[in-house]
Image: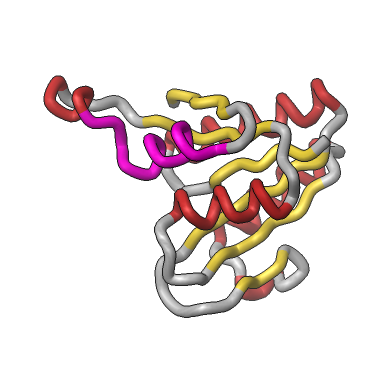
Amino acid sequence: MTIVVGYVETNEGRAAFDKAIEEAQRRDARLVVVSSIKSGPGVLRGSDRDDHPEGLRAAEEKLSASGVAHEIVRMDSGHEAAEDLLDVAAREDAELIVIGLRRRTPVGKLILGSNAQRILLDASCPVLAVKS
């Protein structure tokens, strides 16, 4: 089983990351952490540690300490984060996607965040949405 989580250096991103680790431990699943950067083409894999931002290094350390089988995928495709996350989930044949949601204003509640909405609507597997 594979779980995919979107990782962002926010409270919501960290909450999703922590929940994904918990779910991976509970299900004895492999965890694929996706960090999406909107710039140029290419994909950097978790073994390319020197190219990871400081937050991803801390995430790698936490994952190693957790004992969860894992991979960190840094997407630098130029696409929206939702598209990158959905692409990785499809490629990995994920059985669960974990995302973080932030609190919204009353007007913002009418329209869910565009990335979250796209993932919830387009994912081919269940999505666990986590609040911080």
Q: Is residue 128 magenta?
A: no
Q: In which quadrant of the rendered image does the N terminus lie? A: top right
Front in this rendered view, residue 27 or 124: 124
13 sits left or right of 74 in the view: left
Q: In which quadrant of the rendered image does the C terminus lie? A: top left
Front in this rendered view, residue 73 or 63: 73
Q: How is the image coloured?
A: secondary structure
18 sits left or right of 106 in the view: right
22 sits left or right of 40 in the view: right
* Residue 72 image offset from top left, x and y in percent: 69, 56
* Residue 70 image offset from top left, x and y in percent: 79, 48
* Residue 20 image offset from top left, x and y in percent: 66, 32
* Residue 42 image offset from top left, x and y in percent: 58, 77
When asked about the image quadrant of residue 79, the answer is bottom left
Front in this rendered view, residue 45 or 9: 45
Front in this rendered view, residue 42 or 83: 83
Magenta: predominant secondary structure element?
helix
- Give the residue drawn at x 38%, y 44%: 115
Above/below status of 104 relative to 60: above
Above/below status of 71 relative to 69: below
- Give the residue drawn at x 70%, y 54%: 91
- Give the residue drawn at x 65%, y 72%: 44
- Give the residue drawn at x 61%, y 27%: 126
Q: Is residue 117 magenta?
A: yes
Q: Residue furthest left?
A: 107
Give, as a single range, the part of the protein colored magenta: 111-123
Q: How many marks?
A: 0
Above/below status of 61 relative to 24: below
